[in-house]
Image (cartoon, rainbow, N blue to C red):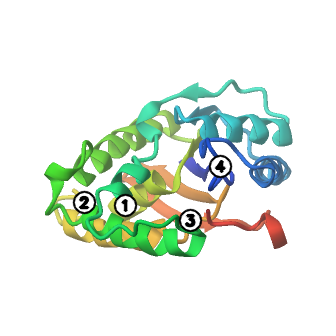
Amino acid sequence: MGVVLLVRHGQASFGAEDYDVLSETGWEQARLLGRHLAAAGVRPDAVVRGGMRRHRETAEGLLEGAGWTTPPEEDTDWDEFDHLGVVAAYPDLPTHELDRREFQHVFELATARWTSGEHDADYPEPFGGFSGRVGAALARAQERAGSGRTVVVISSGGPIAACCGALVAPEPTGEPDPALTWALWGRFNTVVVNTSVTRVVVGSTGARLLTFNEHAHLAGDTLTYR
């Protein structure tokens, strides 16, 4: 049985000029995860990352901590959705600068509107398109995992949540139920911890979600959600 480990990137730089840069905490989270996985005997057959800087830097920290030499491969279908664009499209967006708590509240309202599918014309990438490209990336990772292989994927909270929603919300035909996937996405996305690990097992009957949001390698100030 193969396994795909979905890793959320380390903490990025909220409020900085360039959000897409790991904070010092984010770098430490990545190295801690690497040491944790290596100690658990994980030896990946492939390491895949999204195309964003925070994905690349998390991969670098992860490999440093683990001592792995497997070269990361880029797959931009694992990139996060344009969260700032989704928030900017929210019609009741406050005009003042938002702190972390306020931003989180507005973010949840804005993404609920995005995932509803009722305002697709307002977004360059509607939720259906986003979940479709992430589903294609997951299918490629599953194929590579095959039987007995391990694929580590470094991505973001949104894609990982989309994978989880699709895996636990199938219709009788085996295809995900879009309405339920949208509802589950918001539940998963709001609680994905930085550098947490979500395990997908791949067997003869397809892929199954085994665990979600493992983060035993984190404690205290290294445990973050944003």
Decide which of 217, 88 is in the foreground and name it: 88
> How many marks are shown on the rendered structure?
4
CB-based contact (under 8 Å), mark 2 and mark 3: no
Which tag, 2 or 3, sits closer to the chain's start? Answer: 2
- 161 to the left or right of 136: right
Query: Label 1: which residue?
Result: 167
Which tag, 4 or 3, sits closer to the chain's start? Answer: 4
Query: Label 4: which residue?
Result: 16
Which tag, 3 or 1, sits closer to the chain's start? Answer: 1
Local packing at callout 3 (Cα closer than 10 Å; few below 14, some 14-19, many 20+) is many
Residue beneath the point at 25% across and 65% down: 91
Q: Secondary structure at mark 4?
A: loop
How far separated are the C-alphas under marks 2 and 3?
Answer: 21 Å
Query: Label 3: which residue?
Result: 192
Is residue 9 among the parts visible in the rendering? yes
Decide which of 166, 209 is in the foreground and name it: 166
CB-based contact (under 8 Å), mark 1 and mark 2: yes
Q: Residue type at mark 4?
A: Ala
Q: Position of residue 226 (x, y in %)?
A: 61, 62
How far separated are the C-alphas under marks 1 and 2?
Answer: 7 Å
Which tag, 1 or 2, sits closer to the chain's start? Answer: 1
Query: Label 2: which residue?
Result: 176
Residue beneath the point at 29% across and 63% down: 90
